[in-house]
């Protein structure tokens, strides 16, 4: 690698060349945090790296991650702290021995929350321990919690908040109050890391705890939500039949020139824009022209641009309603927000225009922009494998359209992909790693894949991967959709995979082809003997699709199978499921 900067002397250039030649991307990101930390450290740049500092402050970062974001933040924090001479160690929560807790002095927890307030699988045991009866008193401990979540869910950041409260209850002292991060977390996380590093590095230490300095690299990618790659659409096909009442698209995007790598199981983040008709209707309702300038976190825009590309307008959340109430003081809205059931009902299927129409108020452009949440990227499980498609990424997207209160509505991103892009358009994308949804390392391990609707997407990636690498481990797909005739997604591909020996078995459940609903879990019950035999032979089991009902029902069915086929009590079946999760033999990708 040649170094273009002639302000380094030759010796420095050589040193930098030989260092960077051996670095992987994650190490480069860690080093960038390290050098940033050096810059912030009151200009005092040490001549040598403080890899083995003498009697330096020590801190452990414990992270619980599902998508890898918490681990990324842990890596960034570790880099900055190390640059300030702190001995820092980052440990995954499923590798942390809770018996060490009582002897810890400085801890940072970085942990996400999923779905309806659940911890990520790797943090489940720790969460149970710290919030349970057996958690110890922790008077020696100084700590901080960074909680990641998604404001569209009711129990926003619950795991982190619960851990924070449990630690406070145990007598630990917080260094900074719990930080709650929504899906657009990057800026706030970076600010917090700087603030925390300054406070921690400058405070005299009472710790004498010998922690080894081992820092795992962060998992960021060159392209991110803030710096997406513009991928060209190379194909877009509706894969549900003409007479289907669903609209599912298979979209192929080119990553050519990006150097982006992903693995089967990862997701792609798409930065879409909002339906233009909804933007226009909001402007009309507020009597604003759209040319007014507003300042957002991302920069200055016209209100029209902000509503179209940068602010969430197709869905509401509690925070938006709260801010709306504070601004308008509307009594009826107050009643809604004070009643959980009424609030849930209101949040479901209503958008920003509904609020403006039902509770009119004269907003300035600035006030309107302040009210709204930043537009979060939408994540789709990737339905291709790079072993097979190279510099392409494929997704499988069900278009969300519905009519409510006499108005046609749609999901922001799914209608963007269905209506507002065509072949040769470009789409801003980035990869979101999903280390918790991965094929087994041993290609011979049998896999049972359960997916409903577009939840089948990652299995196309899994099987493409096995086919491209000629891996013929046993595979069994359970797939559910509405109708055989019009909704059998990727039917021809499954059949070919089966013929070529990459898919041993496929069981399908078409819910609306008969009077009574038949779902994937009904097929599992019909095949329960064999399903349990596969598990006994070491199979991994995967579940992908809707989190609200399907995932719960399928898990219940699995427990039932463990009881009948494994002769387990209800408790033992639960324990077995937990063990499968812990051993990463039961993995879920549900949202
Ligand atoms: P869907 O609405 O989930 O429907 C697919 C099939 O599942 C239908 O036959 C449906 O039957 C059936 N179903 C309904 N309730 C069920 C239950 N309790 N148990 C088992 N099956 C049930 O399909 P979709 O519209 O394609 O939505 C997919 C879901 O997967 C979304 O929630 C999405 O967020 C999630 N997801 C998508 C991706 C992706 O990459 N696109 C990745 C991960 C997760 P009926 O409708 O006839 O009752």
Image (spheres, grey):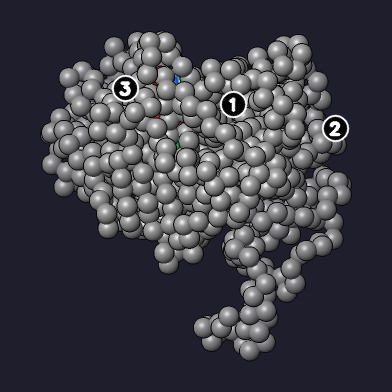
Q: Earlier in the sequence, mark 1 or mark 3?
A: 1
Which element carries disc 2, helix, strand or loop?
helix
The picture quadrant for ligand 1 comes to top left
State the quadrant of the N terminus: bottom right
Instruction: From the viewer's perspective, tell me whether residue 311 is left or right of residue 215.
Output: left
Q: In this rendered view, identify the residue nearer to me: 205 or 178.
A: 178
In which quadrant of the rendered view does residue 408 lie?
Answer: top left
Disc nearer the start of the sequence (2/3):
2
Residue depicted at 71% across the width and 70% down the height:
46
Mark 1 highlights which residue?
118
The residue indicated by pointer 2 is: 99
Q: Nearer the viewer, mark 2 or mark 3?
A: 3
Depth check: give the residue in front, 10 or 245. 245
State the residue in front, 572 or 17. Answer: 572
Q: Which callout, 1 or 2, points to the residue nearer the camera?
A: 1
Q: Is residue 128 above or below residue 271?
A: above
Circles 2 and 3, Cβ within 8 Å, touching? The answer is: no
Image location of residue 102, percent across then percent down: 84, 32
Residue at 74% from the left image edge and 23% from the top image edge = 576
Mark 3 surroundings: few (<14), some (14-19) or many (≥20) residues within 10 A: some
Measured as percent of width and height from the top left, residue 289 is found at 13, 41
The image's mark for residue 349 is 3
* Disc 2: CA contacts within 10 A as few (<14), some (14-19) or many (>=20): few
Percent x, y for residue 277? Answer: 17, 36
Compute the Cα span from label 2 to label 3. 46 Å
Residue in view at x 86 percent, y 46 percent: 209
Helix, strand or loop at label 1? It is loop
Tell me, yes or no, if residue 329 can be seen here. Answer: yes
Name the secondary structure under disc 3. Answer: loop
* Residue 302 drawn above or below residue 528: below
Q: Are marks 1 and 3 in contact (CB under 8 Å)?
A: no
């Amino acid at each position: 690698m040649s170094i273009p900067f002639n302000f380094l002397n030759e010796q420095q250039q050589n040193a930098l060349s030989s260092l960077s030649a051996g670095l992987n991307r994650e190490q480069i990101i860690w080093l960038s945090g390290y050098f940033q930390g050096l810059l912030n450290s009151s200009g005092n740049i040490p001549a040598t790296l403080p890899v083995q500092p003498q009697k330096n402050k020590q801190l452990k970062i414990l992270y619980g991650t599902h998508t890898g974001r918490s681990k990324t933040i842990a890596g960034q924090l570790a880099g900055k702290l190390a640059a300030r001479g702190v001995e820092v160690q980052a440990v995954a929560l499923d590798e942390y021995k809770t018996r060490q807790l009582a002897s810890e002095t400085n801890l940072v927890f970085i942990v996400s929350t999923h779905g309806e307030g659940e911890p990520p699988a790797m943090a489940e045991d720790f969460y149970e321990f710290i919030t349970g009866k057996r958690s110890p008193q922790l008077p020696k401990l100084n700590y901080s919690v960074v909680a990641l979540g998604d404001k569209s869910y009711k129990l926003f950041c619950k795991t982190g908040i619960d851990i924070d409260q449990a630690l406070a209850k145990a007598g630990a002292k917080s260094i900074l109050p719990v930080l709650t991060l929504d899906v657009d977390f990057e800026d706030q996380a970076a600010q917090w890391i700087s603030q925390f590093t300054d406070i921690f590095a400058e405070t005299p230490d009472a710790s004498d705890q010998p922690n080894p300095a081992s820092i795992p690299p962060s998992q960021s990618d060159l392209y991110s939500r803030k710096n997406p790659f513009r991928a060209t659409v190379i194909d877009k096909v509706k894969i549900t039949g003409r007479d289907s009442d669903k609209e599912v698209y298979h979209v192929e995007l080119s990553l050519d020139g990006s150097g982006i790598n992903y693995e089967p199981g990862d997701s792609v983040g798409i930065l879409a824009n909002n339906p233009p008709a909804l933007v226009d209707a909001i402007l009309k309702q507020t009597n604003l022209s759209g040319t007014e300038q507003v300042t957002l976190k991302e920069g200055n825009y016209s209100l029209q641009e902000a509503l179209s590309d940068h602010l969430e307008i197709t869905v509401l959340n509690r925070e938006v309603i709260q801010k709306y109430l504070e601004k308008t003081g509307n009594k009826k809205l107050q009643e809604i927000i004070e009643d959980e059931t009424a609030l849930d009902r209101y949040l479901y299927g209503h958008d920003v225009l509904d609020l403006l129409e039902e509770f009119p108020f004269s907003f300035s452009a600035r006030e309107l922009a302040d009210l709204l949440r930043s537009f979060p990227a939408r994540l789709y499980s990737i339905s291709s494998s790079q072993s097979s498609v190279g510099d392409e990424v494929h997704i499988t997207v069900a278009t969300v359209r519905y009519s409510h209160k006499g108005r046609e509505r749609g999901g922001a991103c799914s209608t963007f992909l269905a209506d507002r892009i065509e072949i040769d358009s470009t789409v801003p994308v980035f990869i979101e790693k999903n280390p918790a949804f991965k094929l087994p390392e041993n290609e011979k391990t049998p896999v049972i894949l359960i997916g409903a609707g577009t939840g089948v997407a990652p299995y196309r990636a899994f099987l493409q991967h096995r086919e491209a690498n000629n891996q013929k481990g046993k595979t069994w797909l359970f797939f559910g959709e509405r109708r055989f005739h019009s909704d059998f997604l990727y039917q021809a591909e499954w059949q070919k995979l089966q013929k070529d020996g990459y898919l041993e078995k496929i069981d399908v459940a078409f819910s609306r082809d008969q009077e009574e609903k038949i779902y994937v879990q009904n097929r599992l019950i019909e095949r329960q003997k064999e399903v349990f035999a596969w598990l006994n032979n070491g199979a991994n089991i995967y579940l992908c699709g809707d989190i609200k009902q399907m995932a719960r029902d399928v898990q219940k069915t699995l427990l039932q199978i463990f009881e009948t086929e494994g002769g387990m009590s209800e408790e033992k079946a639960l324990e077995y499921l937990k063990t499968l999760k812990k051993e990463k033999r039961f993995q879920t990708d549900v949202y």
